[in-house]
Image (cartoon, grey):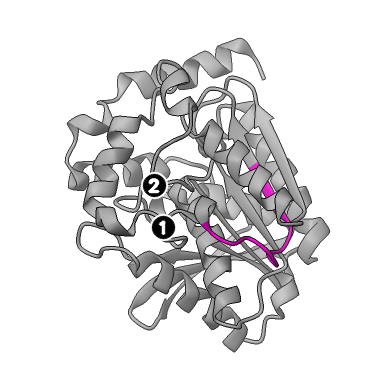
Amino acid sequence: MTVQERQVVFDLLRSIPAPGSMSIPELRAMFDQAGATTKLPEDVVLEEVTIGALRAEWSSTPHADPTSTLLYLHGGGYTFGSLASHRGLVTNLGSLAGVRTLALDYRLAPEHKFPSPVEDAVAGYRHLLDQGFAPQRIAVGGDSAGGGLAIALMIALRDAGLPVPGAALCIAPWVDMMLEGDSMLTKAELDPLVSRHELTRMMGEYIAEKDRTDPRASPLLGDLAGLPPVMIQVSSHEVLLDDAHRIAGRLAAADVAVRLQVWPRMPHVWHLYADILSEGRAALEQAAGFLRERIR
């Protein structure tokens, strides 16, 4: 990584309107447009499918193990994000790991409140089981809200008596709806994309105050025993840093194998900028290595 690469990305993020100044439809359109510019693997094959009423998208490359798959849950504060916004991240991660991917277009707030995304994630996972995938050959993953949702999904699966997946990948996961991490304040000036104010706004669209301690919304507060190995990647310069540290500590305390990587001076979910940021590509490669270890 060069200082110039990082500066280009931070300048780009600071040049766009602050998320708090945009409506949710505007946020959705902007992130979809940004995602459309990301390069996909040249040999990737995409297939859109439906799971009940949900849209989802398979990706695969010729070298992918057909018996291993990653169920991916995009970020976006439960209010925006889509198959389009994260297609580059998901397909490149799957290609590097040599696994198929299934990206899920789960329902979003304010049209669909909590616990709709958790229910949709469970439906996506059940679909993989119904398709004959062995649980130990499935990984679940996500970034930001999607990273928290991946952990909430595993809690829901365990509590329902369903087999948990073989591994989980969480990129800068949002796991605490109480927003109590110190980094919400100490990293506020360093994070050009996420703020406590904006997370509070998204919570207001997504979930009633009385439900914010539900482990399906705040998995940091849940029982994490019996979950599979988890890899967490987070930046030192983002407000969700303490969410990552705290969930890693709670996973370890529950005897869950956890691998926490803190990458210095990166923007939130820097993997999205892998085309222009070498650390984005490097983070994808390390995440892919973890997936190969665990589900191939």
Image quarter hosting the N terminus: top right
**CB atoms of marks 1 and 2 within 8 Å:** yes
* Image quadrant in which you'd find residue 132: bottom right
Nearest to N terminus: mark 1 or mark 2: 2
**Residue 245 seen by the camera:** yes
What percent of the width, then of the height, locates residue 174?
47, 45
Label 1 element class: loop
Q: Find out whether residue 208 is within the magenta segment.
A: no
Residue sitting at x 28%, y 45%:
202
- Name of the residue lying farthest toward the top: 3
* Viewer-proximal residue among 35 and 223: 223
The residue singled out by tag 1 in the image is: 217
Q: Position of residue 176 (x, y in %)?
A: 45, 46
Q: What is the distance, in whole Å, between disc 1 and disc 2 at their CAs?
A: 7 Å
Residue bounds of the magenta highlight: 222-232
Q: Is residue 246 above or below residue 186?
A: below
Residue 37 disc label: none
- Name the magenta segment's main secondary structure: loop
Q: Residues within 10 Å of mark 1 (few under 14, many from 20)?
A: many
Residue at 33% across, 69% down: 116
Disc 2 marks a residue whose amino acid type is Met
**Secondary element at image label 2:** loop
Pick the front one: 43 or 118: 118
Residue at position x 45%, y 66% in the image: 104
Classify the position of the C terminus by image quarter. Answer: bottom right
Position of 68 relative to 143 (above/below): below
Q: Residue under circle 2?
A: 177
Mark 1 is on which residue type? Ala
